[in-house]
Image (cartoon, helix red, strand yellow):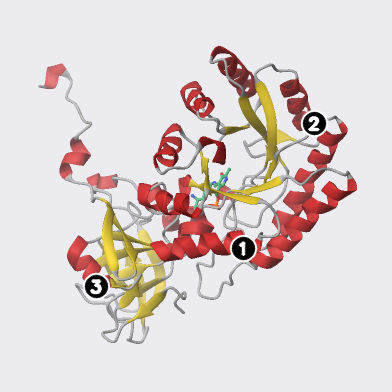
Amino acid sequence: MLKPHFRVNPAGHLVCGGVDAVELCEEFGTPLYVMDEERIRDNYRRFLKAFSRRRVRLCYALKANSNSAVVKVLAEEGAGADVSSENELRIALRAGIEGEKMVFNGNLKTEAELKLALRHGVAINIDNFQELEVVGRLAERMRTEARVSFRINPDLRAPTHPYIATGLRESKFGFEVGSGEALEAYRRARGMKNVKIVGIHAHIGSQILDPSPFVEEAEKVMGVVAELHEMGIELEFVDLGGGVGIPYRPEEREVRLEELAERVISAVEEVEEEKGMGKHLLVFEPGRYLVGDAGILLARVEYTKERRGLPRWISLDAGMNALIRPALYGAYHHIELANKMNLKNDTLTNVAGPLCESGDFLGKERLLPKAERGDLAVIFDVGAYGLAMSSQHTAKPRPAMVMVRRGRAALIRKRETFRDLVRLDLLPPWLR
Ligand code: LLP
């Protein structure tokens, strides 16, 4: 079942953003990432609307897809930004997002990165005691005030792949709550001259489809907010991180966003009302939810292979170099043939990439129409953590990316070239 922003035209070709996928490949070549602008906007508005009875800010997590055009679309919608490096911060600024609407996350922010954040008034989500000291020292030297919040570790198990679960005590992130570490961090910050406490932050993991872990997270975070209130520390915002998932498999269901919003808001308001606190600005940091299903990857079927009793092998011109999620997490991405959307999916197929390792596949034992040399495969839901995590393994240039909107297409990232691949290489003097 195709998601509602796709169509199939009478020729049996996939249509995305009003543009025929086959024509896109003729014009821009393969492998090709395609981002649907309207879908990004719809995703943003749907998320915002679900929380509309509260003051809420969506800080787009640039790590999902930091392409300048993608960030610009979300900036136009009014999004803030969750940045996790100096360059993401720069990309967000260039897209027109003000520093005050950004949060800076991560367990390692270098001094250079922190300085840039301080210069632009970005809220820094502090991860450890040493970082707090560094921030205090830098702010003093720069004669400015650091806006800080603290990432707490809620010690929660999120139902997702272990590599992308981040809220457990044994994970590397944040300040522990149970031992009093989190409160101690706030206590120290309160005594610091150039530090202004503005918020609290948690992030339990990514690709979570069930509302319940977010409710538990909100309860844990609000427990700390209540204790801070008792200590006389009031916050501007409560940041619950990212992590809202999308359906990747045909049988998976959409997250019930209204239910999630209702339950999270109730958990927050219960504590606010009980303690007689003012209403906090609620912050979320969605990445995948905003851009994941807005992206597809188009790849050419170059060769096919038959072996008796085994699925048909097809080799695409894109593999783990272009999209590492299947190899890294065993992630499922739905695959179809973009030029044969009207044909029956009747052939058991293994979908391989072009690299020299057996882990290089995009899907195993999939039902597709019988694929022939020259057909076009479409890999769905790659707008988040697709091109962003791609590599140049075996000196393959990274794919190009286009944006589509109402029948128009424009290149938003050039395909890398041989020159790009060798541009940074140098020979030592003795080999010249
Ligand atoms: N905020 C923080 C602090 C994060 O660490 C992340 C993601 C997000 C927000 C955005 O999470 P999202 O809404 O996209 O789930 N490479 C993995 C995902 C890693 C997520 C890392 N942190 C993947 O391909 O599934």
Nearer to me, 212 or 165: 212
Q: Residue at x 62, y 66 (%)?
A: 255
Mark 3: few, some, or many residues within 10 Å (few <14, many ≥20)?
Answer: some
Q: Amino acid at mark 2?
A: Ile
Q: Which residue is label 3 attached to?
A: 22
Instruction: Give the residue drawn at x 37%, y 83%.
Output: 345
Q: Which residue is mark 1?
A: 49
CA distance separating discs 3 and 1? 35 Å
Left or right: where 290 falls relative to 267: left
Image quarter of residue 252: bottom right
Q: Secondary structure at mark 3?
A: helix
Is residue 241 positioned above or below 116 on the image? below
Between 317 and 340, the residue placed more toward the observer is: 340
Three-letter code, disc 1? Lys
In the rendered image, the quadrant that contains the C terminus is: top left
Q: Nearer the viewer, mark 3 or mark 1?
A: 1
Q: Which residue is mark 2?
A: 233
Q: CA distance from mark 3 to mark 2?
A: 58 Å
Q: Are marks 3 and 1 in contact (CB under 8 Å)?
A: no
The image's mark for residue 34 is: none
Q: Residue furthest right?
A: 274
Q: CA distance from mark 1 to mark 2?
A: 30 Å
